[in-house]
Amino acid sequence: MSASGEDAMPALAAPMAGRRRGGWSLAARNAAFGYVLMLPSILFFLVLIAYPLLQTFWISLHRMSTLTRQGEFVGLANYRALLESADFWGAFGQSLVWTVCCLALQMGLGIGFALVLNARLTFRPAARALVLFPYLLSTVVAVLVWQWLFNDMYGYLNYLIEEYGLSDGPVNWLGQSPNAMISTILVAGWKHFPFVTIAVLARLQGIPPALYDAARIDGASAWSRFWDITLPQLRPVLAMVIILRTIWDFKEFDLIFMMTGGGPRSSTETLPLLIYKEVFPKLSMGSGAAIAMVMLVIMVAFFWVYAGQYDREERARSR
């Protein structure tokens, strides 16, 4: 290289070094642009999630009226009162019964319908569309229909029971315990089982038919094929569905509230309904916020299990 070329290199490098020292590098500009793109999501999280959570926790540390939003700071007194409250533990137990029974019914119906819809049916597209009907139906409309069916005076279910001589008189489906809880669980199972059906059916269609053909050649029965082939293939999907439905059923409010309002005598009162009763009829916003924070901790535990299951599934797919 000539002497003039060697002299030109420092002259070109000096302005570039100056731009790096005085301005942003390409990596810094890309990072800043990334933060700008993330800013709407961060603001959304802070305004709609973080602030309400912190506000709820702060309210739970006060004895506060719902009407005035004024009250004294009591620290953890609301949480101590919950641990000593029979209403709280009763609602907590009923929430567990509600969640477990709804989940069992939804999983049983969902898997059963998915297996039927995965078979070769003549009107399979129409049947799949009809299965989605309960899930797409508004909760208000579904509750009104089922309240009419359960009516103890002119309900169709009581008409069928009396018509076939199954009972001497009308059954009080929603006004007597444990009939109210059982009836509400049946409605919830009917309303939400299509979600399970959709998830399971999608996985069933991805199972290789060669596995079933080989099992038939080996003489495996239908039950053996389900237990040894179908169920292991469904296990990851079922784990995800169980966790999601557990979270959604545990925090269910509208369906129970419209069906029974928590009655009779609080026999269907779950934790979400107890929060409503504390905040509005009793005007005790602090204790209602404390119950909400307890529910949040339980929901976070469920979500932790869900996130762990999701990570395991992602690692298994990547192998």
Image (tube, grey):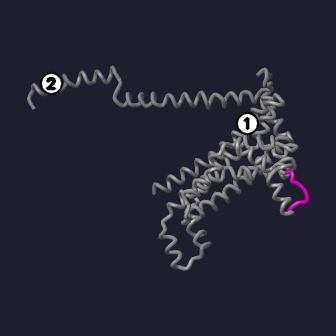
What separation in Å lies between label 2 and label 1 (alpha carbons)? 71 Å
Identify whether 129 is placed above or below 253: below
Identify whether 253 is placed above or below 28: below
Q: Residue at x 34, y 21 (%)?
A: 23
Kindly give the residue lying farthest to the right in the view shown: 168
Identify whether 207 is placed above or below 176: below
Magenta includes 187? Answer: no
Under circle 1, the secondary element is: helix
Screen quadrant of the C terminus = bottom left
The range drawn in magenta is 166-172
Ranked by sequence position, the earlier of labels 2 and 1 is 2
Q: Residue at x 83, y 31 (%)?
A: 281
Using the rendered view, name the quadrant where residue 22 is placed.
top left
Question: Could you tell whether 302 is left or right of 172 in the image?
Answer: left
Residue matched to label 2 = 8
Pinpoint residue 79: horizontal percent, then vertical percent: 79, 35
Using the rendered view, name the quadrant where residue 83 is placed.
top right
| Front label number (2 vs 1) | 1
Q: Residue at x 50, y 60 (%)?
A: 206
Question: Could you tell whether 168 is left or right of 103 in the image?
Answer: right
Identify whether 133 is placed above or below 201: above
Q: Residue at x 67, y 58 (%)?
A: 109
Pick the front one: 77 or 268: 268
Dominant secondary structure (helix, strand or loop) of the stretch shown in magenta: loop
